[in-house]
Image: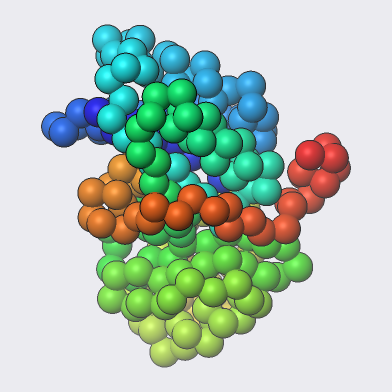
Amino acid sequence: MILAFDTTSSVCSVSIFDGKEIITLREESGFKHSTLLMPLIDRILKENNYTTKDIEKIVVSNGPGSFTGIRIGVATALGFKKGLGVPIYSVNTLDMMSYSSDDDIRFSIINARRHSVYAAGYGKKILKFFNDDFDVIKSFLEGIVEKVTFIGENISEFSEEIRTQLNISVKEVKSIGSEGIILSYLDGKFSEDITPNYMRKTLAEMERNL
């Protein structure tokens, strides 16, 4: 059985995969992942008649994303590795997010503040991972007439820019979290390197001094 968890956003999510189906639990955390992650893991195991002894491998999102969240997720994965002796793998957060939609033109976007983003494009318009001003995406989309999907949270300002300045229809979708980690892993998009890929702290994290 594969255990996956995502702590890179304001939602804490945990998934298990037994080779047949993906089962997921998620809860709005307000970046309090340290108090939610282990209870969610215990709950999903118990509700599906598993114990930690059934875990064969662990996959975790290692960023980019919440500074504090990534730290908690990676540390938890390392703790399981030490305690259970199981292999652990990482999935890029943007790749994970891309599985939240199957639309032809979709972008995983993390708001890095001050009009900057961590983003990547998937589907018919491939755009490699970058960390820069959102104008990079605007330039990339010039001339597009098809509907575009933005995946992420706190990204309405970017959607509105595309609608008003480029006259392109934009749909916003929330990330499916750890379910996307499982799907990414099954597609071979994973790494044995779980080094955290931090982004600068969000405003909410700085206000809480996390």
Where residue 130 sits, quadrant-wise, is bottom right
Residue drawn at the location 32% of the way across and 17% of the way down = 53
Quarter of the image for residue 133 reads bottom right
Q: Is residue 182 left or right of residue 42?
A: left
Q: Residue at x 77, y 43 (%)?
A: 205
Res. 52 image quadrant: top left
Q: Is residue 173 visible?
A: no
Percent coordinates x, y for residue 98 in the rendering: 38, 57
Above or below 49: residue 209: below
Give left or right: position of 87 versus 76. left
Q: Nearer the viewer, residue 122 or 19?
A: 19
Q: Position of residue 97 (x, y in %)?
A: 42, 53
Quarter that holds the N terminus: top left
Q: Nearer the viewer, residue 68 or 99?
A: 68
The residue under the point 67% across, 70% down is: 116
In the depicted structure, whether residue 9 falls above or below residue 159: above
Residue 32 sits above or below residue 174 on the image:
above
